[in-house]
Image (cartoon, helix red, strand yellow):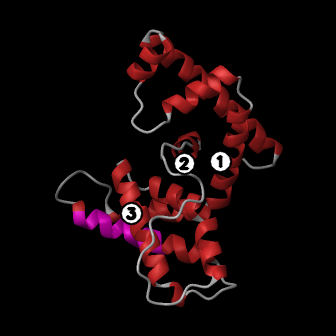
């Protein structure tokens, strides 16, 4: 449980919540309700993809591709039905398609493992969403210096050595502080989840 929560709760992307990738040419006309659904599920879709792929650039690429497909196939979606079920299936197929393309270039998960992970994540999507909300609240409750350190660590292309230099601290000290902060955040998230009745 801890492994999944740590994997799926952190964020290391420069995109802002709710950002939609660059506009693309779309065949069917887009309704306001459909666009609202796409925007509302951006964070959730990106986290779903991030839990299935290692490489940050791969995550960004597949997320973009998924949004292109969603917009192109907007006419296939029936308003009032489960947008998350439909869009996460599109994301799943895009992950599999991406892995087939890069299979010869690097070590990747097998399609069977990706399918199993996707099924597990899909079944636990509400729990993952609740963990993210809890994590956001726990980060917001940190003392300002600790919160700033977390923000520095998860900024794009940040490294421990660069952070240590900017703070005038030894790298080992920064690592130790981040370790203690992560432990405190995990405990905070678990307390909040228990209080909500989510195991």
SS assignment for the magenta stretch, majority: helix
Question: Residue drawn at (75%, 44%), measured in percent from left and top?
Answer: 193
Disc 3 element: helix
In terms of depth relative to the viewer, which is nearer, 161 or 51? 161
Disc 1 element: helix
Question: Quadrant of the image for the N terminus?
Answer: top right
| C-beta proximity under 8 Å, tags 3 and 1 | no
Q: Which residues are magenta?
A: 90-101
**The image quarter in which residue 38 lies:** bottom right
Question: Residue drawn at (35%, 68%), measured in percent from left and top?
Answer: 96
- The residue mark sitting in front, 2 or 3, is 3
Check residue 35 for magenta coloring: no
The residue singled out by tag 1 in the image is 132
The residue singled out by tag 2 in the image is 8
In terms of depth relative to the viewer, which is nearer, 77 or 24? 24
Question: Nearer the N terminus, badge 3 or badge 1?
Answer: 3
| C-beta proximity under 8 Å, tags 1 and 2 | yes
Question: Around disc 2, counting alpha carbons within 10 Å, would you say few (fewer than 14), some (14 to 19), or many (20 or more)?
Answer: many
| Left or right: 119 in relation to 62 | right
Disc 2 element: helix
**Label ID, residue 62:** 3
Question: Nearer the N terminus, badge 1 or badge 2?
Answer: 2
The answer to whether residue 169 is above or below residue 95 is above
């Amino acid at each position: 449980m801890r492994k999944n929560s740590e994997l799926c709760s952190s964020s290391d992307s420069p995109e802002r919540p709710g950002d939609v990738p660059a506009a693309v040419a779309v065949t069917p006309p887009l309704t306001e309700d459909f666009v609202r659904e796409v925007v509302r599920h951006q964070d959730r879709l990106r986290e779903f993809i991030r839990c299935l792929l290692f490489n940050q650039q791969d995550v960004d690429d597949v997320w973009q591709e998924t949004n292109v497909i969603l917009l192109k196939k907007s006419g296939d979606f029936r308003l009032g039905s489960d947008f998350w079920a439909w869009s996460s299936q599109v994301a799943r197929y895009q992950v599999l398609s991406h892995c087939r393309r890069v299979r010869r270039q690097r070590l990747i998960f097998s399609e069977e493992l990706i399918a199993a992970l996707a099924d597990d994540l899909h079944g636990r999507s509400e729990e993952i969403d609740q963990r993210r909300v809890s994590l956001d609240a726990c980060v917001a409750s940190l003392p300002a210096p600790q919160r700033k350190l977390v923000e520095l660590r998860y900024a794009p292309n940040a490294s421990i050595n660069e952070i240590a230099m900017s703070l005038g601290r030894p790298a080992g000290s920064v690592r130790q502080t981040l370790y203690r902060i992560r432990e405190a955040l995990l405990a905070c998230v678990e307390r909040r989840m228990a209080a909500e009745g989510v195991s």
